Image (cartoon, rainbow, N blue to C red):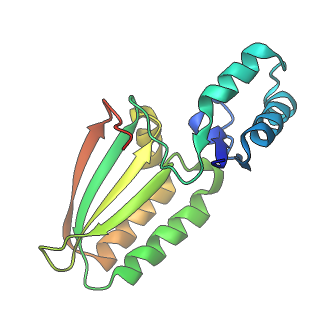
């Protein structure tokens, strides 16, 4: 049986809760229901359980749905470690205020020292809150120090997710 996960960051919330629960499906549903009641003030019942069931994902799956927002950033770097350190500092400083859900950094096989980063957000508004945050502004300055030239940005609305 595949392990399941429930991530509050993928659910609409005013509190920006970052709790993630994983385990066997029945365990996750029980814990998620208890969390929804005690932390978020929901009432337990069939409707809540159906909503939680719909939010379950296979563990390890990068969570992304139509309506989400992805930013693609292409940059050049001789030393990727400096970029990784800047990202880790950003994550530590942003803490619970982070609106990014996941990121992937890939090396371009055809162009040495060229990388592409994909960063996923629940929606465009969440991405803009992230971009406007002072910690992200500091990260952008640090990124310029550890990369070469101007990074190229593409702002992408997710219209379809293909599960392979």
Q: Nearer the viewer, residue 118 or 130?
A: 118
Q: What residue sits 39% from the left and 72% below the top? A: 142
Indicate the position of residue 44 as horizontal and vertical percent values: 84, 20
Q: Nearer the viewer, residue 67 or 79?
A: 67
Q: What residue sits 47% from the left and 77% below the top? A: 85
Give the farthest residue toward the left. Answer: 110
Indicate the position of residue 17 as horizontal and vertical percent values: 69, 41
Q: Is residue 77 above or below residue 102?
A: below
Q: Is residue 100 above or below residue 163?
A: below
Q: What residue sits 34% from the left and 37% below the top? A: 162
Indicate the position of residue 41 as horizontal and vertical percent values: 82, 24
Q: Quadrant of residue 118?
A: bottom left
Asked whether, in this view, residue 23 is left or right of residue 67, the answer is right
Indicate the position of residue 67 as horizontal and vertical percent values: 39, 28
Q: Is residue 71 above or below residue 161?
A: below
Give the farthest residue toward the front. Answer: 1
- Regarding residue 72, the answer to whether it shows in the image is yes
């Amino acid at each position: 049986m595949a392990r399941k996960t429930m991530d509050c960051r993928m659910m609409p919330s005013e509190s920006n809760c970052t709790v993630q629960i994983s385990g066997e499906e029945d365990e996750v549903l029980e814990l998620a229901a208890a969390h929804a009641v005690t932390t978020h003030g929901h009432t337990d019942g069939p409707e809540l359980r159906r909503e939680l069931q719909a939010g379950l994902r296979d563990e390890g799956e990068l969570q992304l749905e139509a309506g989400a927002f992805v930013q693609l950033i292409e940059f050049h770097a001789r030393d990727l470690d400096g970029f990784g350190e800047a990202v880790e500092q950003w994550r530590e400083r942003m803490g619970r205020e982070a609106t990014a859900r996941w990121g992937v950094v890939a090396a371009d096989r055809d162009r040495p020292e060229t990388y592409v980063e994909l960063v996923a957000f629940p929606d465009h508004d969440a991405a803009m809150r992230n971009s406007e945050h002072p910690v992200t502004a500091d990260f952008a300055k640090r990124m310029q120090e550890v990369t070469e030239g101007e990074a190229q940005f593409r702002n992408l609305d997710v219209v379809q997710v293909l599960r392979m």
